[in-house]
């Protein structure tokens, strides 16, 4: 039945063209373009020609310096103290056009701490990027273990033969089906200051002792709130993957363990967990990648604020590339993110490799 | 060591009755085999003894104690599964010692008991391997090792050889037989393979549709099957059945004949055989032999299978009924050739007419 059409090489390529073309246009080409742009001063729209700038974008983002600020001293050489506080020269004396400190040029204070009379200061070329990097890593470090553990717990609960168990499966999976943008909007209401749902609930549970918080408007709770909501939203998806892993474990292994008198915990430790190795590797890598790609929640709920406490890498990449029309800066962040995720995935694979 | 007593054991899944009242007495140290076609409830029965299935009715005693509500781990049993059920991520040593690990035994105790089990099963050289590096037979050995370490009063085997190839199955069958002799423990063994049942068992329990059909020593079942099902199930190739009419009967024999069967006197000892009426004649293929002329049955050869040591001939009688004849010699038959078959009337089996005769 093979017609000429199905055997023709050209026809084959022609049929593959739409798919291949779309993938190339929107995934493969942009991927390499990002590498290319990150080495130039390309802007979204600019009258000036694009120039090759080498690794300048990278040093602009990653540039860091360490500086010890010594107190101002009087004639006797003692530190000047006013109102109980040691007085220091202003940092900008060193960072702005000071020929003695070319390495501090243009940098700003990221954080500092007191060391005796001196103040140790860490400066960064791009403080916002550094905050975004730290926030992203924090997000990943909290979300990866929390979400995978919770998802495993739920999977163990719903992997039972109970009446109506599929109802629970559906309920736990529901947040995954809802668009993250919608979920973010809903949680914005839940978190809203004053009479938001969460504040009301806590106040009800504590008989009015709870002082309402502005969850997303407070730098110390904003990132935590986003973490909580993200874990809730994604947990159902990973639950299903765990569940698939659980169901590959042969029931006779459980029966064998039961006959040996294994307790619930021992059964988990000796039968279930070892049987889930491959699933665990998969889930850890997927969660890590998803967590690094955090964007929609930030865009909808906080736009990186307050005080950059919820700045994250992808949000920064978009903000720079399109908000500030700095395509090369956005590309550089994307490339850095790619390298970070790649490195972590390789590390995780190596750490969880099968030892023989 | 312990007896196992099943008294009126029943099992239902919702409205479906799987085991419909089973009474079996298994004596201390006996090797009992449950056989039956798939779906007869033999595995379910074994799993109820193991404690992996709830008992819906009746009582189960192991060593004189009713164990209906005692968890599997405290019944003093060990079970070997068809799929081996050895833990893939543990070495053989860890697998065999699993029960001891669970119980928190000391390292020295584990070493000692694992070494003993390994010696009995001759698998000392396998102890540090992983299950993925073992053959099917070796895996089953590990599973048996794990059972031995528990020092159970009753060993339960659930079709342990079904996943092995034919040659290995023979080896392991001999091993299990030896194991039973050396340990002297009570063993209950489930299989659908009647050869395993015949060779291993002290006592065979034939099950069908949740009922016990017959209990007895292998040769009792072979020579004196109580009903058509047992007669057809035990022995390979299966017994031939032909409808006959009873012409006359005296104390221990009956004259029978039909359009296919020349009149002869068959021994009668089963109940339900009257002085006249219909009955079912059973003859084992091995009891039939070709004769040059005459004989009780006549037909045409449709197919002859030569196995070297025996020849199995498929014969179509005049009305198209097919019967098998197996002779312990290598002989050539041409398809279509006429054949006369005779047999020793004393070896014929006469069954009361059973509406299910054809189904069986």
Image (cartoon, coloured by chain):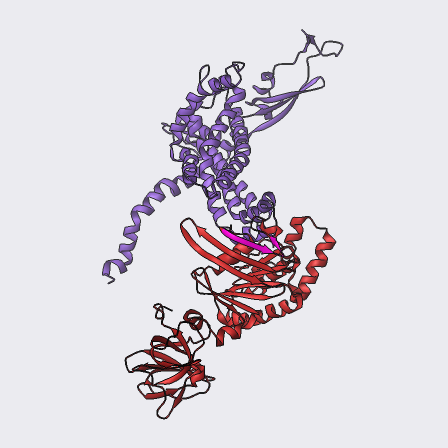
Chain colours: A purple, B red
Q: Residue at x 53, y 58 (%)?
A: B46
Q: What segment carries the magenta color?
A: B57-65
Compared with residue A67, is residue B125 higher up or lower down, i.e. above or below?
A: below
On the image, which quarter does residue B241 sit in? Answer: bottom left
The one of A30 and A353 positioned closer to us in this rendering: A353
Compared with residue B44, is residue A68 higher up or lower down, i.e. above or below?
A: above
Q: What count of labels does the image hold?
A: 0
Check residue B59 for magenta coloring.
yes
- Is the N terminus of chain B in the top left, top right, bottom left or bottom right quadrant? bottom right
Check residue B125 for magenta coloring.
no
On the image, which quarter does residue A209 sit in? Answer: top right
Say whether residue B311 is visible. no
Q: Position of residue B356 (x, y in %)?
A: 35, 67
The one of B68 and A288 positioned closer to us in this rendering: B68
Q: Residue at x 36, y 28 (%)?
A: A45
The one of B102 and A287 positioned closer to us in this rendering: B102
Q: Main secondary structure of the magenta part?
A: strand
Q: Residue furthest right?
A: A76
Horizontal side of residue B130 vs B283, given as left or right: right
Q: Position of residue B133 (x, y in %)?
A: 58, 61
Q: Position of residue A321 (x, y in %)?
A: 41, 29
Say whether residue A9 is visible. yes
Compared with residue B9, is residue B266 higher up or lower down, i.e. above or below?
A: below
Q: Position of residue B308 (x, y in %)?
A: 46, 84
Q: Residue furthest top?
A: A83
Q: Residue at x 53, y 72 (%)?
A: B218
The one of A166 and A279 positioned closer to us in this rendering: A166
- Is the C terminus of chain B in the top left, top right, bottom left or bottom right quadrant? bottom left
Compared with residue B4, is residue A271 higher up or lower down, i.e. above or below?
A: above
């Amino acid at each position: 039945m093979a017609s000429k059409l199905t055997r023709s090489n050209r026809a084959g390529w022609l049929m593959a063209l739409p798919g291949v073309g779309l993938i190339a246009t929107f995934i493969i080409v942009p991927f390499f373009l990002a590498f290319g742009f990150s080495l130039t001063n390309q802007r979204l729209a600019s009258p000036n020609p694009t120039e090759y700038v080498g690794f300048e974008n990278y040093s602009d983002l990653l540039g860091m310096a360490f500086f010890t600020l010594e107190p101002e001293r009087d004639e006797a050489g003692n530190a000047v103290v006013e109102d109980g506080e040691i007085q220091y020269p202003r940092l900008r004396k060193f960072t702005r056009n000071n020929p003695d400190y070319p390495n501090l040029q243009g940098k700003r204070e990221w954080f500092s701490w007191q060391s005796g009379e001196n103040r140790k200061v860490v400066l960064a070329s791009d403080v916002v990027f550094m905050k975004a990097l730290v926030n992203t890593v924090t997000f990943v470090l909290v979300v990866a273990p929390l979400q995978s553990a919770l998802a495993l717990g739920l999977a163990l609960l719903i992997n039972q033969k109970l009446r109506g168990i599929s109802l629970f499966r559906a309920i736990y999976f529901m947040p995954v089906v809802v668009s993250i943008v919608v979920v973010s909007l809903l949680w914005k209401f839940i978190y809203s200051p004053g009479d938001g749902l969460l504040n009301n609930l806590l106040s009800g549970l504590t008989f009015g002792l709870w002082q309402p918080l502005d969850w997303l408007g407070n730098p110390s709770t904003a990132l935590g709130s986003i973490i909580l909501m993200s874990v809730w939203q994604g947990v159902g998806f990973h639950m299903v993957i765990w569940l698939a892993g659980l169901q590959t474990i042969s029931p006779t292994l459980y029966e064998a363990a039961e006959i040996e008198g294994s307790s619930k915990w021992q059964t988990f430790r000796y039968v279930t967990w070892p049987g889930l190795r491959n699933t665990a590797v998969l889930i850890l890598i997927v969660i890590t990648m998803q967590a690094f790609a955090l964007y929609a929640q930030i865009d909808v709920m906080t736009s990186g604020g307050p005080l950059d406490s919820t700045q994250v890498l992808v949000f920064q990449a978009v903000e720079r590339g399109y908000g500030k029309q700095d395509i090369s800066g956005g590309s550089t962040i994307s490339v850095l993110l790619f390298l970070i995720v790649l490195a972590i995935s390789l590390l995780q694979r190596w750490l969880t490799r099968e030892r023989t | 060591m312990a007896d196992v007593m099943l008294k009126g054991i029943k099992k239902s899944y919702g409205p479906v009755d799987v085991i419909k009242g089973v009474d079996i007495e298994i004596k201390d140290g006996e090797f009992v085999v449950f056989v039956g076609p798939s779906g007869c409830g033999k595995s379910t029965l074994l799993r109820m003894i193991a404690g992996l299935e709830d008992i819906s009715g009746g009582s189960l005693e192991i060593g004189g104690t009713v164990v209906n509500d005692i968890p599997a781990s405290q019944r003093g049993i060990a079970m070997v599964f068809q799929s081996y059920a050895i833990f893939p991520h543990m070495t053989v040593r860890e697998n065999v010692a699993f029960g001891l690990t669970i119980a928190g035994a000391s390292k020295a105790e584990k070493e000692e008991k694992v070494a003993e089990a390994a010696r009995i099963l001759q698998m000392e050289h396998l102890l540090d391997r992983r299950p993925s590096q073992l053959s099917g037979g070796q895996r089953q050995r590990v599973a048996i090792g794990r059972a031995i370490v528990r020092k159970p009063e009753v060993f339960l085997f659930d079709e342990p050889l079904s996943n092995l190839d034919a040659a290995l199955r023979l080896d392991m069958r001999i091993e299990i037989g030896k194991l039973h002799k050396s340990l002297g423990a009570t063993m209950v063994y489930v299989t659908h393979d009647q050869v395993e049942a015949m060779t291993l068992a002290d006592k065979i329990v034939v099950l069908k549709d949740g009922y016990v059909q017959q209990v007895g020593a292998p040769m009792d079942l072979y020579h004196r099957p109580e009903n058509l099902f047992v007669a057809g199930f035990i022995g390979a190739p299966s017994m031939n059945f032909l409808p006959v009419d009873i012409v006359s009967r005296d104390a221990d024999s009956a004259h029978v004949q039909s359009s296919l069967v020349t009149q002869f006197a068959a021994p009668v000892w089963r109940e339900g055989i009257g002085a006249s009426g219909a009955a079912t004649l059973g003859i084992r293929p091995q009891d039939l032999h070709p004769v040059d002329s005459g004989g009780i049955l006549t037909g045409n050869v449709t197919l002859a299978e030569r196995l070297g040591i025996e020849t199995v001939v498929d014969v179509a009688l005049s009305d198209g009924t097919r019967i098998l004849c197996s002779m312990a010699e290598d002989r050539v038959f041409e398809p279509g050739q006429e054949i006369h078959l005779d047999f020793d009337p004393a070896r014929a089996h006469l069954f009361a007419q059973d509406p299910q005769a054809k189904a069986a």
